Image (cartoon, rainbow, N blue to C red):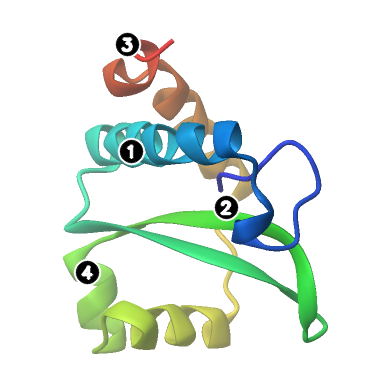
Amino acid sequence: MVKPIRHVLHLADLSKAESAELGPLLHQTAAAVTEVMDPEQVYTCLWSHAGAVPGHIHFVVQPITLEVMTRFSAFGPGLQTALFREGTLPDPDEVTLICARIRTASAWSSSS
């Protein structure tokens, strides 16, 4: 997930400086996820609703593999909907390991 540090309800509420940082940050994050996970695609989607009202904006950066698309017979928004409906959460230990690998990925560290 990528999100602004300050509380922002709408993408249009970002300052020009925050907007200028967003594109490169999403690119660097997707590149690091690609390097570590080797997915078919990395979905990057803005989500902000909580209880049907705008909440803090955040971008979901989600690696998508052929195995996941095949398992759900879906892709794009249909796949994300199927994943949400399934409600299975990833193993916290595996997430910790993958996040550590992403932090040290060359695509991420070269942007520092």
Q: Residue at x 37, y 83 (%)?
A: 77
What residue type is disc 1 on?
His
Mark 4 or mark 2, which has the lower sequence index?
4
Mark nearer the viewer, 3 or 4: 3
Q: Nearer the viewer, residue 22 or 84?
A: 22
Mark 3 or mark 4, which has the lower sequence index?
4
Q: State the mark number for residue 67.
A: 4
Distance of mark 1 from mark 4, alpha carbons?
A: 24 Å
Q: Residue at x 52, y 41 (%)?
A: 19
What residue would you read off at disc 2? 91
Mark 2 or mark 1, which has the lower sequence index?
1
Mark nearer the viewer, 2 or 1: 1
Q: Secondary structure at mark 2?
A: loop
Left or right: 86 in relation to 63:
right
What residue would you read off at disc 1? 27
Q: Compared with residue 17, is residue 15 higher up or lower down, i.e. above or below?
A: below
